[in-house]
Amino acid sequence: MGNDQSTMVAPDELLARFDARTAAGDAIEAKDWMPDAYRKHLVRQMSQHAHSEVIGMQPEGNWVTRAPSLRAKQILLAKIQDEGGHGLYLYSAAETLGISRDEMIHQLHSGKAKYSNIFNYPTLNWADIGAIGWLVDGAAIVNQVSLQRTSYGPYSRAMVRICKEESFHQRQGYEIMTYMMRGTAEQREMAQDAMNRWWWPSLMMFGPHDGDSPHSADAFKWKIKRHTNDELRQKFIDKTVPQAELIGLKVPDADLKWNEEKQSYTYGKINWDEFHRVINGNGPCNKQRMEHHIKVHNDGAWVREAATAYKNKQNAQKTNLN
Ligand code: FAQ
């Protein structure tokens, strides 16, 4: 049902129809009527997702000039470029909800919009690039495969495309870790050190435990989420632990145990104090990430102005021709 019809239908009826459509698993499209709370929920989540993709380019960008081979450098550059592209799809998809990209960026810079906890940690050695690809993209895929079936059409279609690229990213990260684990004692130590530092923050990427996740109830009602934060975290752990073991990496969790009955791993306590510190601006690299984003955004103002001026000139020429 489009906007034109919505002006003739009572609000309760519109809401009842919307609820029936989401309950039936229909995709909601940009021009469909939707409750304001649904729109706001999606703007929050999708803009945070877009910001994460773009801010996520920074820790990896740190290693472009120091990649250990030309092959590694080419792959890393391509991956970082993909992440920028994911940000663009997601900003465009969020714009269909009536918010401008400028406003989203303003919300990021003012601290109103968050981005993923994970990108506030430093990349100290080359193995960190392996750990990001393998663990961070690995966690992102588990979450995003589920989001391919999210109820908002433009978001779910962006996810389908993004997931295809993320699976390459996950493999390039695992390749780096595998290579290092077959190398010298020093290289194995670097890989294990990266694993120790990235494992727990990767588990935090899925968000708080189900009972502490304030947005989940609405997200389920509207089928924005199809799986809970804990379900997805568990899926990631069950998939990743055997991959670690296969190449000789130790998962840094003394409480990690295979549960035969559940056919999955039980795991230790996540440090939620650290999570809240990091998402509220006090992680190791929050200040650096945001300062860099603001600087680059300001430095690039002339590019946006030039692009807009060119577009305006083209439009004026079209009008004159008509
Ligand atoms: N980081 O009630 P919930 C990638 C916040 S892409 C920061 O459970 P929800 C690719 C949450 O916003 C990674 N904040 O929230 C890549 C809320 O605070 P608010 C990004 C978090 O939305 C790889 C509060 O906690 N992926 O990595 C986080 O139902 C390599 C309560 O939480 C996405 O964004 C967190 N991890 O569930 C790129 C996926 N978790 O907003 C470059 C899409 C929770 O009220 C290099 N997002 N919070 O102030 C989602 O699926 C959901 O938003 C969740 C959180 C699951 C993240």
Image (cartoon, grey):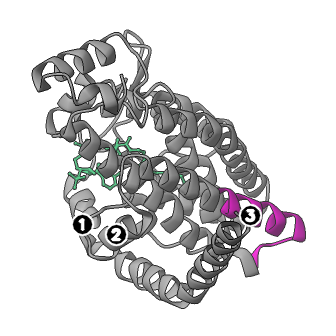
- Give the labeled residue for mark 2: 108
In this rendering, the answer to whether 93 lies above or below 101 is above
Mark 1 residue type: Lys
Q: Main secondary structure of the magenta part?
A: helix
- The reply to whether the C-beta atoms of the residues labelled 1 and 3 are less than 8 Å apart is no
- Give the labeled residue for mark 1: 112
Marks 1 and 3, how far apart in space? Answer: 31 Å
Mark 2 residue type: Leu
Q: Which mark is residue 76?
A: 3
Name the residue: 39% across, 79% down. 290
Marks 2 and 3, how far apart in space? Answer: 26 Å
Q: Position of residue 304 (x, y in %)?
A: 57, 79
Name the residue: 23% across, 67% down. 280
- The reply to whether the C-beta atoms of the residues labelled 1 and 2 are less than 8 Å apart is yes
Mark 3 residue type: Leu
Q: Which mark is residue 254?
A: none
In which image quadrant can residue 314 be found?
Answer: bottom right
Callout 3 secondary element: helix
Out of 41 and 57, give the one closest to the viewer: 41
Q: Which residues are magenta?
A: 66-82
Out of 51 and 9, give the one closest to the viewer: 9
